Image: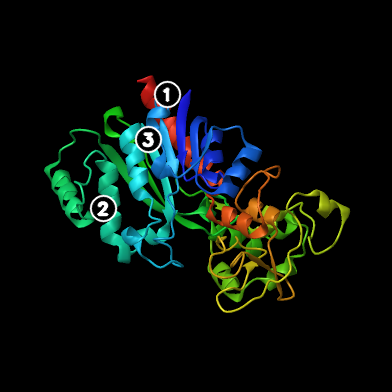
Amino acid sequence: MKYSVELFAGAGGLALGVEQAGFRHCAVIEFDEWACKTLSTNRRWPIFHQDARNFDYRSLLQPVDLLAGGPPCQPFSFGGKHLAHHDSRNMFPEAIRAVRELCPKAFLFENVSGLHRKTFSNYFEYVILQLRHPDIVPRGDEEWASHFARLQQHETVGSKTGLHYNVVYKVIDAADHGIPQRRERLFIVGFRSNIGVQWSFPSPTHSAEALLWSQFQTGEYWAYHRLPKKSRNMMPAEMAEKAAKLETPPLLQPWRTVRDALKGLPDPMQPSRRNQLINGHQFIDGARSYKGHTGSHYDLPAKTLKAGVHGVPGGENMLLLTVGDVRYFTVRECARLQCFPDDFVFEGSWGRIVKQLGNAVPVELATLLARSIFKALQQVARK
């Protein structure tokens, strides 16, 4: 049995993927009350409703194979105030403390791609060096820049004394791995250096070119959805231009689209007994299109689902209808786009649920990454 600890679990997208990969949670830690209710409703995990800063890792009895989590991303998001290490919501120090105290064989952290941009380059490198050498801690009230310099000195000497991790990172677009959503996120993976793991991020399996080939060249996409080929005329003009440049069939699978993800769900704008029976599939009025918020096209991957922190509940979480209007995705549709199972129930008001979904890691992407880590740990265990 391989054990895991989940930090900043939210609604459990990453935690579900880690479980499906074969790990068993010995602690799932989350501060938000409604996210904890969602977790408790759906899983019998050891859930700790508390601030991660107050968690005592000495209470855990099992050695931990994988530490996973998504430290709150507001300090680094494109829509936030960009305060980074000055932001009280920056939980990377707690993630690093967890690595130091648990000494897991591996860790998997997720964050917004903004953490990797030039504005935060020094702080990002600081985070990576702390993850490589988690037992070199700040001295008292030492400023982060001074601690950063000490870590650089330790790194350049080439010393691997004490607790040391081999760390890699990559910005991944979820659509490139079969998730029906354009969602770029930064993933950081580390393996304890003394266990001798060789690992790399899984290669993309899906592509935009393959989707366009199936829509504009073979028509297989429209046939699968039982739509006439002329439906491609509703696609954005730039998609047709890109498709016209394709000369040979792409090797990867087609990107999955909103239509693929929502297949089998009835139209929530048409009142029916069936709609009422589907949990979270009720129509929500009030969606409006404006500059920068134009909704997702049916026949492309959805735009990134957001947590609704920009003044509009649901933010960009809208579907562009064929007549040019927009409507909000229902909770169940958002859950489909994030790859949650249909029997997964979300607790709270619509705004609270949208926040949970917008912050989640797509379950299938989490499973892919965690399974790859699980297999790597299995291989070294057999040696």
Residue 358's place in the image compared with 47, above or below, is below
Residue 122 relative to residue 288: left or right? left
Q: CA distance from mark 3 to mark 2?
A: 19 Å
Q: Which mark is residue 106?
A: 3
Q: Nearer the viewer, mark 3 or mark 2?
A: 2
Q: Compare residues 13 and 175 and report the one nearer the observer.
A: 13
Q: Which residue is mark 2?
A: 126
Asked if residue 11 shows in the view, the reply is no
Q: CA distance from mark 3 to mark 1?
A: 18 Å
Residue 241 relative to residue 265: left or right? left
Q: Measured from the top left, where is residue 311 in percent x and y?
A: 56, 70
Give the secondary structure at mark 3: strand
Name the residue type under label 3: Ala
Q: Earlier in the sequence, mark 3 or mark 2?
A: 3
Q: Picture quarter containing residue 115?
A: bottom left
Q: Which residue is mark 1?
A: 61
Task: Give me the residue at 84% from left, 63% from top.
Answer: 270
Give the secondary structure at mark 1: loop
